[in-house]
Image: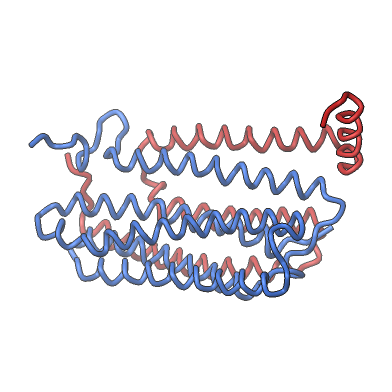
Amino acid sequence: MVEIPYRTEIRPDTGVYNGKMGIWLFIASEVMLFGGLFSTYILLRVGAVSWPEGSEILNVPIATFNTMVLITSSVTMVMAWASLAMNNFSGFKTHMGLTILLALVFLVAKAIEYNAKFSHGLFPKTNTFLAIYFTMTGLHAIHILGGIVVNAYLWFTGEKMWKAGERQGLMNRVEVAGLYWHFVDLVWIFLFPTFYLLGGK
Amino acid sequence: MASGHSHDDVRSHVQSYLLVFAALGLLTVVTVLVSYFPFGIAGGIIVALMVATVKGTLVAQIFMHLKSEAKGIYGLLLLTGFFLLGLFFLTIITVMSQQGDDISLQYQKSIETHHSTGGH
């Protein structure tokens, strides 16, 4: 069987294995996606006659809690990779499991937040602030969901790869999934102050 | 050559992960507290972005291992950063060219022009 090149070996011209270059390319495209939406936010805000203070409309305590949840999930994600690097498979299962759990907690908190808005008659169509808020945090939530699916796949199928001796292969997959996860955390680190904490006009 | 990491390397990395975790927690508290300070609109935006940038840098450098990453990745990110700045520059240029104009008035004018040229 032909081995896929540079799956675990470092490619000399890029300096990394192919999966890592691939995920960074994907992250670059995601930077442009969220960057475009942040540009939209800037244009809408500057062009608006008035703009609400985030805390007037949005729930800062829930969002602060969610920020801590995502940061913690980033730590558990990198610890999952580190566990594999230190030959500790059960450590990987624990930390990856925690990452998935924390991600679900984030989504539940987001659902509670959205539901509270809807029950008060606040929808994306209500005003420009809410339109861009729901668009950006909604897109971010979809990215979290995607991350949960990938992480859950690795959690369930990792043992098979580990026991088959494909340890470097599994480590690389977890590292690549981790890079995506940290990026999703990074986006929230910017979303949180932008929508929840900035003053209005 | 496999992309290996020695146990000792990773063990020392674990310490830095936990330190960064503590720093990120502290900076989150700072982010919220600072929003209550009377910096004004522009000042508030600058301070919030500065804190977010510090947090983002810690995540990128330590969690995403950018600190010790290959040149190929740095090159890719430099290119991405260039295009992202270009995107923001386009937005700022658009805003500056409309400075002082009432956006709703511009929209009104564009509707009137459209109707007068026989549009529907």
Image quarter (top left, top right, bottom left or bottom right) of the N terminus of chain A: top left
Q: Which of the 4 image quarters holds residue A97?
A: bottom left
* Residue A2, horizontal then vertical, whole percent: 11, 34
User: For this rendering, which residue is in front, A94 or A100?
Assistant: A100
Q: Is residue A165 left or right of residue A127?
A: left
Image quarter (top left, top right, bottom left or bottom right) of the C terminus of chain A: bottom right
User: For this rendering, which residue is in front, A75 or A170?
Assistant: A170
In percent of the image, x 35 and y 53: which residue is there? A177
Q: Indicate whether A113 appears above or below B88.
A: below
Q: Which of the 4 image quarters holds residue A161?
A: bottom left
Q: How is the image coloured?
A: by chain
Residue located farthest toward the top when viewing the structure as drawn: B117
Identify the chain drawn in red: B
Colour of chain A as rendered? blue
Q: How many marks?
A: 0
Q: Is residue B7 left or right of residue B25?
A: left
* Residue B81, horizontal then vertical, whole percent: 55, 37
Q: Indicate whether B43 appears above or below A13.
A: below
Q: Which of the 4 image quarters holds residue A199?
A: bottom right
Q: Is residue A78 left or right of residue B29?
A: left
User: For this rendering, which residue is in front, B88 or B103?
Assistant: B103
Q: Indicate whether A59 appears above or below A139.
A: below
Q: Indicate whether A120 appears above or below B68.
A: below
In percent of the image, x 63 and y 75: which residue is there? A61
* Residue A103, horizontal then vertical, whole percent: 44, 67
User: For this rendering, which residue is in front, A151 or B2?
Assistant: A151
* Residue A50, horizontal then vertical, whole percent: 85, 56
In percent of the image, x 79 and y 62: which residue is there? A52
In percent of the image, x 88 and y 37: which residue is there? B106
